[in-house]
Amino acid sequence: MRILALFALAAAAGAAEDTPQTRYLRWIDGIAQKHLDQRASRIASVRTEADARQRQEFVRATILELIGGLPDYSGPLNARVTGRLDHGSYAVEKIVFESLPRIYVTANLYRPAQSGRHPAVLLPLGHWEQGKPAVQGIAANLALKGFVVLVYDPLGQGERLQSYDPRLNASLAGGSTSQHFMAGAQSLLAGESFARYRIWDARRALDYLVSRPEVDAERIGCTGCSGGGTLTTYIAALDPRIKVAVPSCYMNSFRVLFSGPVGDSEQSLPNFLSAGLDQADYVELFAPKPWLITSTLGDFFTPEGARQVYEEARRFYRIWGAEDKIGWVVGPGGHGTPLEVREAMYAWMIRWLKDGKGDPREQSVETSPDFELLATDTGQVATSLKGRDIYEVIRENLQARRRDSTRAELVKFIRELAAPAGDTALAPRVVSREVEAGLITERIRFESEPGLELEASLLIPRVGGRQPAVLVVETGAPASPLAVRLARRGNVVLALNPRDTPHPSSYPMLGNWLAATRAWLAGRNLPGMRAHDIRRGLDLLAGRPEVDGARLSGAARGVAGIWLLLASAIDPRLRAIWIDQTPASLRSAFDNPLHRNLHEAVIPGFALRWDLADVVLAIAPRRVIWTDPTDWMGAVRPLKGDYRYRPFEAPDEPYVRDLMR
């Protein structure tokens, strides 16, 4: 079993005392906690069953809105059994069905040997790379206790790898979580959440499960760990066919979770907190049906966060007179399902789906090597069945919903995107000052929004008089060689690091996903906030006595060019900008399953109405110098339009001259 350690990286973000990351984290956590305070006041007013039902209606509608609704598809499952394994007391059937056209789901059905109709359990998976074989011990034990169990591979796992390369027998994106991030960023840009496709798979798996003649459709439970706990939470809350839920190692209040191990794309819905929700809302939406939360003492989804969910949900269940139907169990060890947790889950399922008749003690079972549980010949739906990748579905959905919008609507949208949380005095302070031949360098800190301080280097040529100025957007150490060259040409230069930059990452394809995720959970947007940071940098430059405020320009490389474009669209003080090796189109992110640093540029729903070419038009007639435009893998692309290309290792000088003319 291998689970990616992204959560551990997220938790480590708070280790340092004063870095751009910890300053941003403290600031954005403050916003999140205010949303949670407001929610707490609303929850406190829920006192009667009528209040509770009204809250449930609000929560259900809000969740569906946040994920972009569920797919409008009612086609056949086209399910078939591709093989069987007989274990005497139970059998395992290998299943393939279609969730959406040519989106194939591979599964194993564990069926008790006894005849008749049985209660059933849907068992979604966590982020195990091998998929369904990872939980065969749990599934077999449930089958021995009289349950029909369906275990299915999630997207990006088991036999459903995305961007699959048969030469490597692996995904080009990396592990399962990275594959989810690829689809997650694309989904957000298209105005939806990757969660909708994960939930849809679970619903279609449930469709298959209840179609089986051995299954009593009125007695269905759901359980899963980690990412499977997420899906258990979602499908139980949204599909009334689930009668009992046991999510493991997932449920936590964002009171604790937000500044810790925030989950990946399907686990972090845009505007979730700003819409007035927390994870307890899923449990309360399920009420008064039986729900058991399970945790472990050493999990990064901490027992304290789970306790807060449990305590609030218990009060909600008390309104219904059903406090015995909400439970919480904490087992030993780290992230996972130790024996104590597994047996508590068996007992809960037996209690509520089998009238308490059965033995919850775990039995020793025969397990199979992974290849014996494959439902396809090659072990991948991409090669055996010519299945589609989910990015193709996301792209089709985007194309079906695209609509035109005006320049005025775009400018208004960007202004709202970049709007600060409140007014604050710039109040720059000089941290250090160096003087060398012809150049003064001041290291500066200033507030971009109330409570959020940024860092920048101000480079002042010692030439006297009022000089033109250039804001250089930095994503690494401040005062890059470009910034120094511009200053030595006689320009006052502000080398600005927008919030939470530079950002160290062990996952270079993902970029600063964590800062972006926390922003959208709290109802903010990272590219928009960084555009605001750039505007505050312009405020600083325009207020300097050495600067000619009528001659302000900007420069950026890579994805930072998108933040500069957004700032320029709403700030006419920038008379010209130069962006280099910046992706030319947000919509081109849907052309392939892979992308680099897309989280740094994701604006939920933006691709439905606009692209970066529309932002350039909004800047006109001011100049945008765009050199070597790229795709989302960083390759320079030959494109039509007002782009400029330069030979290998050609110098910046011609473009610097053009920027300053």
Image (tube, rainbow, N blue to C red):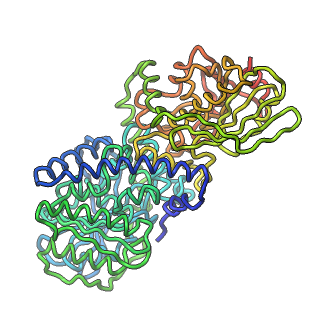
- For the question of whether residue 392 can be seen, the reply is no
Of residue 541 and residue 633, the one placed in the foreground of this image is 541
Residue at image point 32% right, 83% down: 365
Which image quadrant for residue 363? bottom left
Q: Position of residue 122 (x, y in %)?
A: 26, 64
Q: Is residue 523 left or right of residue 235?
A: right
Please identify the quadrant where the C terminus is shown: top right
Is 174 drawn above or below residue 272 in the view shown? Answer: below
Residue at image point 78% right, 35% down: 484
Of residue 112 and residue 579, the one placed in the foreground of this image is 579
Which image quadrant for residue 577? top right
Q: Position of residue 28 (x, y in %)?
A: 47, 47
Q: Is residue 451 left or right of residue 640?
A: left
Residue at image point 59% right, 58% down: 17
- For the question of whether residue 501 can be seen, the reply is yes
Which image quadrant for residue 157? bottom left
Is 415 drawn above or below residue 443 in the view shown? Answer: above
Outermost residue toward the right in this view: 437
Q: Is residue 482 left or right of residue 283?
A: right
